[in-house]
Amino acid sequence: MDQHKSFGSDNHAGAHPAVVGALAQANTADAPGYGADPWTGRAVSTLRAAFGARGGVYFVFTGTAANILGLSLLLRPYEGVICAESAHVNVDECGAPERILGSKLLTVPTSDGKLTPGLIGTRLHGRGDEHRAQPRVVTISQVTELGTCYSLEELKTLGEFCRAEGLRLYVDGARLSNAATHLGCSLADLAACADVLSFGGTKNGAVGAEAVVVMAEELAADAPFLRKQQGQLASKMRYLAAQFEALLDGDLWRRNAAAANAMAHRLADGISGVPGVELWQPVESNAVFASLNPEHIERLLRDWQFYVWDPAANVVRWMTAFDTTEADVDAFVADIRRTAGE
Amino acid sequence: MDQHKSFGSDNHAGAHPAVVGALAQANTADAPGYGADPWTGRAVSTLRAAFGARGGVYFVFTGTAANILGLSLLLRPYEGVICAESAHVNVDECGAPERILGSKLLTVPTSDGKLTPGLIGTRLHGRGDEHRAQPRVVTISQVTELGTCYSLEELKTLGEFCRAEGLRLYVDGARLSNAATHLGCSLADLAACADVLSFGGTKNGAVGAEAVVVMAEELAADAPFLRKQQGQLASKMRYLAAQFEALLDGDLWRRNAAAANAMAHRLADGISGVPGVELWQPVESNAVFASLNPEHIERLLRDWQFYVWDPAANVVRWMTAFDTTEADVDAFVADIRRTAGE
Amino acid sequence: MDQHKSFGSDNHAGAHPAVVGALAQANTADAPGYGADPWTGRAVSTLRAAFGARGGVYFVFTGTAANILGLSLLLRPYEGVICAESAHVNVDECGAPERILGSKLLTVPTSDGKLTPGLIGTRLHGRGDEHRAQPRVVTISQVTELGTCYSLEELKTLGEFCRAEGLRLYVDGARLSNAATHLGCSLADLAACADVLSFGGTKNGAVGAEAVVVMAEELAADAPFLRKQQGQLASKMRYLAAQFEALLDGDLWRRNAAAANAMAHRLADGISGVPGVELWQPVESNAVFASLNPEHIERLLRDWQFYVWDPAANVVRWMTAFDTTEADVDAFVADIRRTAGE
Amino acid sequence: MDQHKSFGSDNHAGAHPAVVGALAQANTADAPGYGADPWTGRAVSTLRAAFGARGGVYFVFTGTAANILGLSLLLRPYEGVICAESAHVNVDECGAPERILGSKLLTVPTSDGKLTPGLIGTRLHGRGDEHRAQPRVVTISQVTELGTCYSLEELKTLGEFCRAEGLRLYVDGARLSNAATHLGCSLADLAACADVLSFGGTKNGAVGAEAVVVMAEELAADAPFLRKQQGQLASKMRYLAAQFEALLDGDLWRRNAAAANAMAHRLADGISGVPGVELWQPVESNAVFASLNPEHIERLLRDWQFYVWDPAANVVRWMTAFDTTEADVDAFVADIRRTAGE
C-alpha cells in the first residue's frame, strides 16, 4: 500500500483499535441470533437515548443499505424523494433507490450540497396530479457530500417546512458524527428535525456498521421486515452491535470525528494563502475541497491518494480520517506547497 | 445467556478465534476501499482456484444477500426459479426473491429437501407461453434445509438435466462446507454442476461473511453493479476478505465443518434406540432432525435451546456448530434419555 | 377462422353489438381526458351504487392489470397474498404479482379452485416473524378458474374469517357476472365480503374493459396514482366507460352471462350419460370441465377449438360465451356423442 | 362539454370515424385471442414493412405503457436512461420508469426538449464504476414535449453517436405521425436511428392504441413476456389492431397529422405580430407554445381550454387535433387578438 496516509476517503482507514477489541470481546459463548443478544440490546438502548428515538434502531452493513432501509419506511410506491443532485442516494448507489425502492428521485442542483425550503419548493408542483410522482420525502445529508454542514437553525427551518408541507425528512448521516462535532451539539439536536436518520459508524472508525434510527414509533413497524427483505439482517448481530458499543463508550465517536475534523482544518490552514490553491467549499467536517492547477493535481497524484471531484473545474477532495496525524497533514501540506511552486 | 450449549442454530455460536484474529491483523494501515485491497485479492484468488471458478468471487454480508445476488445474475424479469418448498429462498427470506429480484418461485414439495429431475420436470410446463413465468433457474441447497446432502452423482445428474433443458443451476451453499466434509470431496467437486453458488462463512465460524462464486466468465459482468445496488458492497472489504482468508488457511473451513458434523453424528448415535425418539431425516451434516413425544419436547425446551421444526409432526431440529464439544452433546443426550424415561 | 363456434375461451367471442354501438355513440365532440368526462362519471356512479362501493371505481384494460391494481391497494412490500394454486394471478399473469407488485404468493392446492378458512389457515404461520413474508391478503376468484362459484354463505364465512384474522380479501371477478347470474344475487351481494374486487367486462361482451371496485373509502387514495404508474390510465377514458355503460344498461351484463351460463348447462346436459365422458367439476358458470378418452379429445380437436386443461388427467375445458347459440352447443354435443362412439 | 373546440390536448378529440368503423367491422365472429387473429397479423405486417422493423410490433393501450415496454427491452437492472428533463417518461408517468422498470433516469436540462450528443455526453461519466447507474439507453421524443422535431440529420447524428458510444436509442413516438408529416419523410426514415420506438395512435385519431416497434430481431425475444407481465396483453387484440389498420389504410395517420399540423401553423400565423404574444418554440407539429400577458391568459381560460405550461414564464400550450377546423382556429385567433387588445 501507499507509504503516505491516504486522503482519498475516510473509508481507507482501518478500524479504531477499541472497535476491533470490542469485536474480540464479543466473541465469547453462544448468543441468540438476529439481534436478540445483549450487545444489541445495550447498543440499541444507548442509541435510542442518545437520539431521543422512540421508533427504534436497526443496524445494517453499509451506507447504501441504511439509506434504502430508512427511505423505505417513509414511501408509498408512487411517492418521490427530493434530494440534492450531489446526494449519495442519487450519485453513488448504482440506482438502488430506483431499483430496490422503486422510487423517483426529484433532484435539485445546489451550490453547496444543501437543500433549502426554496430549493425544495421548486420540486413541489404537481401534488395531487396522478401523472406525477408525488413528492413525499426530503432527504438531506449531514455532513453533505461537499463537506458542508447544516446549522441547527437550518435544520429547524427545514423540519418545520417539511412538517408544514406534509413532507417527511430523512437524514443520510454517514458522517453525522463529524457534523455533531463541528456544530458542538448532541445527536438528539441533529435528530430533532428528522423522521428517520442513519448514523454512520464505518467512516468513523468502525469495521463496517451503520444504524438506522427511527424517531417516531409509528414509522418503525415495517423496519424489521424490510431490513430482512433487503438482505441486511445479521444473524450474528452482536458483531455489529459491539462496534457501536465501542464507538459509544466514552463518546469515542465524537473523539474520532473531532480528530478527523481537526486534521481537515489543519490541512485547510496549511494551504491557506498558497497561490493558485483555493478552497471551493468551507471546511465544516473532515473534507477539504479545493481547486488548484491541473498540472499540480497530476503531480500530487503521483505520490498521494485523493479524488479529483470535478475535473472540469479542477476541484479535488481531500478527506481526513480518525487516524490521520498532524505529521500526515504536514507532510501533505509541504508537498502541496512545494508543488505549487513556493 | 444459556448455561448449556445451544442446539438452536449454528449461528448461535460465535466466530472461530482464528477469524477474529485475522480481523485484528487486517486492522493495520490504510487500504483501498471496495475490494481493491490485498486481503480481498488473495481471498478471491484462493476461492477462485478452490472452486475452479472462472467468473469471479463476490463477498456479501448475509445468506439472503448471497442468494439474491447469485440469482440476480441468472434471471430475466419474466423468468422463474424452481426450488423446493422448504428452500431458504422460499421460506426464510421475507419475500426478498419476489421483492428484490421480482421473480416468481416455482416451488415443489419434497420429502427430504432435495430436487430431482422428475420433481423439476413438474414445473417445466408452459415454456414459451407468454402467460407463464418462464422456468429458467433451478436452485438447490447443499446442505438442504433438512440437513441432507446431494451426492456427487445426484449433482452430476442435476447439472446434466439442467443443461439439457436450458436451465441454470444455482446452489445455496450456506452450509457448503458441511456438505464437502460429509461427502469427502472438494469445493470444486460440488461446484462442477453449478452456474453460480454461494459459499457460507457465517454458519461455519465467521463473524459474518458469505461468498458468491460465479463459475462461468460470461455470467460475472453484472455482479459488481448488482452487488452495489443491492447494498452489499463493503467499503472496508478487507474485513470480509480476512474472514475468508482465515477460514481458507489450512482448510479451517473443513476442520470446522468436520467438527460440527461429527457432533451431529455423536448426537444421533447417542439417541439411537431411545424409545419414542426417531430420526426424521438421515444425518448428513450438522443437523439432526428427530421426532419425539411432544411432552418430552416441551420438557427439554425448559433447559435447552432448539427449534420445533414441525409442530404437527413433533419434529425438532438440533444443530451443532464448529465449537460444539463432546461434553455438550453428551450432556444433551443424557437429558434426552432421561426425559424419554429411560 | 373456424367455421364452428369456439369453445376455447369466452374471449374468442367478439363484443356485444350494444357495446360497439355505445363506443360509436361516445365518438362525438371533445371530451376531457383521463376520466373527467361524462361517460366515466355516469358509469362510475352506476357501478358504485351497484356494488355499494364507497371507495371508488377505476377502469383498466385487462384482467391482469385489474388484479395487479387491486392487490397493490392492499399490500405493504413484505406482505404476501394467499391464493389457490390454480389462481389466475399465480398461473396466468407471467409473474406480474412478483414483478410489478413485488409480492410473494402463498399458494394452496385445492380440489375445486376454492379457498376455505381451513386452507387459508395452512398459510398463516410465521406471522410477526421477520424472516417470513407476512400473509395479508386473501384472493379468491369468483367464478374460479375451474368454473366453480363460492356460495353467498361461503363468501360470508370467508369475509368474517379474514376480518377476524386481520386479512384483507380481494376478489378476482373477471367472470363476476357469471357468478351473480348463477347465484341469482346482486353485485353488492358478491361484494359484501370483499375489500376490493374486479368486475370483468371483456369476457362478457365488452371490447376490452375491466373495473377495479374499491369498497372502503380509505383504500382508494392510492388508486389514481397506482393506475397511472401501472400504465392503465386511459387518456380517452370515455371509450372504456361507454363499454360499461352499455353493459350496465338494462343489466345487459346479466343477460349476457345468463346466456353463456345456460349454454354451459345445455352442453353439460347434452353429454350427460355419454359413456367415457365425465364432468370433472360441477357446472356453475359458463365453463364445462370434463374428462374423456384422450383419443376422442384428439379427434374433437380436429374440428373444434377448446383447451386440454390437464393432459395427464385427460381433462378438457369447454367455455361458452354470451353469443354461443343453442345450435352451436347442439352441433358440438352431437359431435362429442358421435366421437364417443354412440 | 365546451362549446368551443379544445386546444387543451390532442387527446380531448374523439376518434376518427374510420377508426370506429373499423372497430365495428372487426366485431364479427370468433377470433383467436392474444393477437393470433387476422387483424393483428395484417396490422403488424404493415407496420413492420412501414418501419423496416425486423424485431416485431407489439400493441399496447397507453403511451406510458409503450414507453415502459419499449425501454424494458433495452435495460439491465443497473442501467439508466438518459432523457431530457421535459421528457414524458420523466414528468408525466407517475414514476413508472423507476417503479415498473426499476431504472434511473439521467435527466438533462434542454431549451427545446431535444437532446444532442453534447448534452448526452454530460451524463456519460462513471461508466464502468460500480457505484453509478450505468448509462445505457438514450430516449428522445419525436415530436418532443415542446412541440419541436428532430431533423433527419439530427436523428442520424444521434444514432451514430449512440452506436459509437455503446448506447441504445429509444424513441417515444406518441406523436410520431406529426413528426413524419412535418419532416415530409417516411416512418422508416424516422426509425433508422432507433433500436425501439413507439408509434402513437391515440393522439392521432385512434380510440386508444399504441404500437411498440422493435427494429432489431435480437431485441424482440422478451417482448411478448414483458408485455403480458406489464398488463398490456389484450385478449381481444383485434380491436387494437383494427384501429391501426384504419390509421394505416390510405395513410390516414398522415392525413390526420397533416390536418393537425396545418391548424397549428394557422394558429401561429394568426397570432403573428400580435403585441405581447410571442412564440416560445418554433411550430413543428400540432403544438403552439406561446407566452402572453398573464391577465390575457386568465381571460382566455374563461372561454377556452388549454394548459398553462410554465406559470412563471407565462407560457401556454395550444394543441390542435386531427379534427380541429379552420373555423375553430379562426375563432380562437380572433379571441386572442381581441383579448390582446387590438
Image: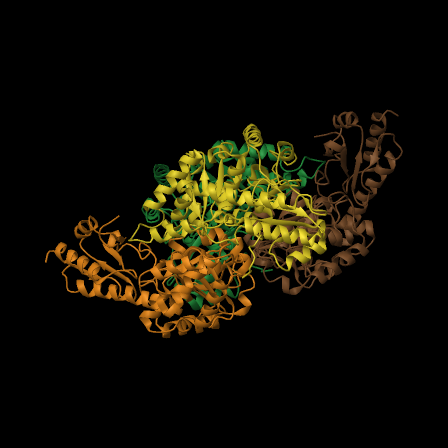
Chain colours: A brown, B green, C orange, D yellow
Q: Position of residue D291 (x, y in %)?
A: 69, 48
Q: Quadrant of residue A269?
A: top right
Q: Which quarter of the picture shows residue A218?
A: bottom right
Q: Within the image, what quadrant is residue A279 found in?
A: top right
In the image, residue A311 sits, relative to residue A282, either above or below, namely above
Between residues D219 and D126, which one lies in front from this camera angle? Answer: D219
Residue D144 versus residue C172 in the image, above or below: above
Which residue is nearer to you in this view: D278 or A40? Answer: D278
- Is residue D49 found left or right of D3 in the rendered image? left
Residue C264 at x, y percent in the picture: 25, 63
Q: Which residue ends up furthest to the left in the rendered image? A: C342
Residue C229, horizontal then vertical, whole percent: 53, 53
Q: Nearer the viewer, residue A324 or C76?
A: C76
Relative to B171, does residue B282 appear above or below in the rendering? Answer: below
Q: Is residue C268 visible?
A: yes
Residue at the extreme front = D342
- At x 47%, y 42%, the residue is D255
Expressed as whole percent of the image width and height from the top left, the position of residue A34 reads 58, 55
Q: Is residue D70 left or right of residue A245?
A: left
Of residue C25 and residue A178, the one placed in the foreground of this image is C25
On-image quarter of the C terminus of chain C: bottom left
Count of picture labels: 0
Is residue B266 visible in the rendered image? The answer is no
Q: Looking at the image, which residue is at 66% across and 62% down?
A: A55
